[in-house]
Amino acid sequence: MIFLKLGGSLITDKTEVEAVRWAVLRRIAEEIGDSIASHPSLRLLLGNGSGSFGHVVAARYGTRNGVTTAAQWRGFAEVSTAAASLNAIVRAALQDAGLATVSFGAHSSADCVDGKITSLATKPIQSALNANLIPLLYGDVAFDSVRGGTIVSTEEIMSYLAADLQPRWLLLAGETDGVYDLDGVTIPTISRTNLDEIRAALGGSRGTDVTGGMVTKVLSMLDLVDAHPNMSIRIFSGLHAGAVRDALIDPESVAGTTIFSRLK
């Protein structure tokens, strides 16, 4: 079982508004199709970030931090529309590549308490996998008993699903060759043992990102692998031709950063 997230920075230009990187998206869809064709036993769950779609609207309304006023609820609906719009584009590209995918939105399946997912409908996702369909998740709005409404990232959704689906790898395909140190060199591995050494190198995110950027990603991923020591995480660039295909076949064959648990 492999989880693969197509980052918003990879499939969109996050410095613009609703700008899809069409050539990149279509190539990646074909690479995913190629990897499944050559390895039919591969079980795959996909997700996409919101990139220049949902993040821009969410930042305007502050949706992540809570929704109470009429204007904020309107923003909540606009974020949902923007996120679903990009997801539909991704799904169409995957289907054009011959892949049978079904989308799952958190707005209708997740419950949150103060920004944390407390429940998520997992049976439909499992049913899709059992039917040899590819579940396609995405960062989305969600109702929250404390904040009224919030946003849950694709990584947060995948992290919640890890307990039930037990993936061997979580692959995070973005626009950078992993996590960089202060000299711009890719850090090959990250665990709790070297976190203090590399913490200063963890910056933010190029463009608008309401879910925190690289520092938030790395810290949350360390929490995830500590909770599931048999799982590893690979952060790599999907901009290189063939990288997504190769990562699905052999995650450590592509340049990038591996995050793993010290409990392993």
Image (cartoon, helix red, strand yellow):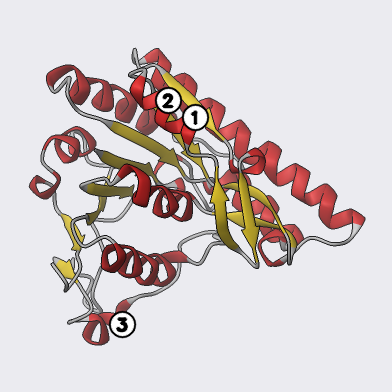
- Residue at mark 1: 124
> Which residue is pictured at 73% across the width and 67% down the height?
146
User: Callout 3 environment at 10 Å: few (<14), some (14 to 19), or many (20+)?
Assistant: some
Query: Between marks 2 and 1, how big is the CA–CA gap?
Result: 5 Å
Query: Between marks 3 and 1, how big is the CA–CA gap?
Result: 38 Å
In the rendered image, residue 143, in percent from the top left (x then y), is placed at 71, 52
- State the quadrant of the C terminus: bottom left
- Residue at mark 2: 127
Q: Do labels 2 and 1 touch, CB within 8 Å?
A: yes
Question: Left of 142 or right of it: where is 99?
Answer: left
Q: Quadrant of residue 3?
A: top left
Q: Secondary structure at mark 3?
A: helix
Q: Earlier in the sequence, mark 3 or mark 1?
A: 1
Going by the numbered disc 1, the residue's amino acid type is: Pro
- Residue at mark 3: 199
- State the quadrant of the N terminus: top left
> Which residue is pictured at 37% across the width and 44% down the height?
5
